[in-house]
Image (cartoon, rainbow, N blue to C red):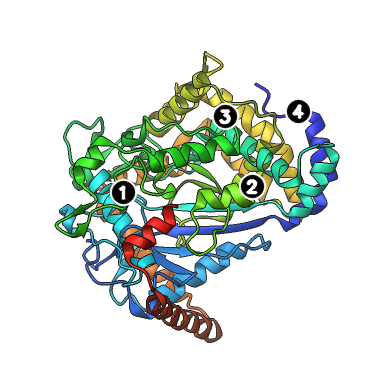
Amino acid sequence: MHLLHTDKLDTLRKLSDHLPSIKRGLEKESLRINSQGYIAQTPHPEALGATLTNPHITTDYSEALPEFITGATTDRMGPLVELTEIHQFTYKYLGDELLWAMSMPCVMGKEEDIPIARYGSSNSGKMKEVYRLGLGYRYGRFMQTIAGVHYNFSLPEDFWKALHKEEKSELELQAFINEKYMGLIRNYLRYSWLIPLFFGASPALCQSFIQSENIDLEELVPGTRYGPYATSLRMSDLGYQNNAQSGLSVSYNNLDDYIAGLESAISTPDPYYEEIGVQVHGEYRQLNANVLQIENEFYSSIRPKRVTFSGERPSKALRNRGIEYIEVRALDLNPFSPVGIENQQIAFIDALLLACLFAESPAINPREKGEYQANFKTVVYKGRHPECRLSLNNRCVAMKEIASDLLKQIRPFSIQLDNVYRTSDHTDVLDKLEGQLDNLEHTLSGRIVADIEARQDGFFPYAMELTRGHKEYFADNQMSEEKLVWYQKEAAKSIKDKLEIENSDNVSFETFLSNYYD
């Protein structure tokens, strides 16, 4: 297996002066729970600002599912610092409530116990709420309570100009950037199973999440189901890789095809969704009855992205201005970190993404797509099995052998990043992961299963203890008064901005939707 070629490493070294300008950002979700461990039924705290307009703190699917968003920065540690600050600020206003430490949710009651996120009376706020209602009708609300971390990554324009010149490309610069980012994405899809293998942290879940007994999960202890060798049930059929979208075909072979696939899904009616209805008794149930309501409904472990203008659809932004950054979406919450992700995870992903960028990346044909999807599913369910095997070019190969080769081929990129940032983080994490290949029980998922087995009291008490530990951490490590005032001002400004949007609406919701899709 040859992931990369040596001449590409020479190119990387020539361009290394541009690597310090890589921008990174984080988006992290967490369920807000009450002191007994159930999903909070209280509204999003007003002191945190307006979820429609606060750029740092919003909500994902549920009113009880806050999402923390850092800015994009060239400071390598900046996103973790900012994510810590947002947690510190949030905990000041949670009272006895907590932020659940796990990706898989706490004790679940009924679907109606999961409150839909509210964004106010504006057309844009109503659109966000109706979209979430539609997700509930289409997939059920349980799946929407699963939390994760998204990692945003972009290379600077000077890097792209230098690479464009180095490769003597005849493409316009943005077309060249689009082509390279799509090649990165294709390679990531080929090898993305490395993420759940090493960083998957959802091998077990509360029995209450299982809505059907026809689930191939074993009982770990009473009240807890698990996969004995599972890594990330969040990324399984139970979670984001839901079978409801298995027939959706979106190509990553070029940006135009990717956009066309999404736009086709947004404009193609679906018989089942038509049965649900769009408006029933005057109340909206979903934005439309098409395969996708909007682009964000397409569940993928990685996305090409472009910052949108107000009211602009993501696919239109990509078509008009091209790819700006990559969003990696395969990360479970790391329950051993108070903020859900650690520096070493980011260091590994940076090296992996660079390796994927500089490797040859041919178009993905249907056979290869089936292969990498099957490999991902195998690792999600059975990645820690000592004899786990994956498909590689139609051959059955030991997973550990492929993983070991990939880590070796990623190492030159880790070394280069260490040199640039004057650290050992990138090679340290590779050393750690190579050691885990010899004993996969030392991975995050392996540690979680071992801990629950040792305690014998189940997923929920274990996760609750970790959750309380995180709250204590932030109680002991509070933000400065200066930072507190800054976040308070940002929250107050967001409330003012939301009111201005509500007061400026001058068309009906139906007209607003029509304009959005036009």
Q: Dot 1: within a 10 Å radius of its alpha carbon, few (fewer than 14), some, or many (20 or more) residues?
A: many
What residue is shown at x 82% (from left), y 31% (from top)?
Answer: 7
Does residue 419 show up?
Answer: no
Dot 2 amino acid type: Asp
Dot 1 amino acid type: Asn
Q: Is 63 or 264 nearer to us in this picture?
A: 264
Task: Find out whether the residues at labels 2 and 1 contact each other: C-beta distance under 8 Å.
Answer: no
**What residue is pinned by disc 2?**
350
- Determine whether the residue tagged by mark 3 lies in a helix, strand or loop: helix
- Determine whether the residue tagged by mark 4 lies in a helix, strand or loop: loop
- Residue 288 circle label: 1
Q: Dot 4: within a 10 Å radius of its alpha carbon, few (fewer than 14), some, or many (20 or more) residues?
A: few
The image shows residue 43 at horizontal and vertical percentages of 27, 72
Mark nearest the camera among 1 and 4 is 1
**What residue is pinned by disc 4?**
5
Mark nearest the camera among 3 and 2 is 2
**What residue is pinned by disc 3?**
403
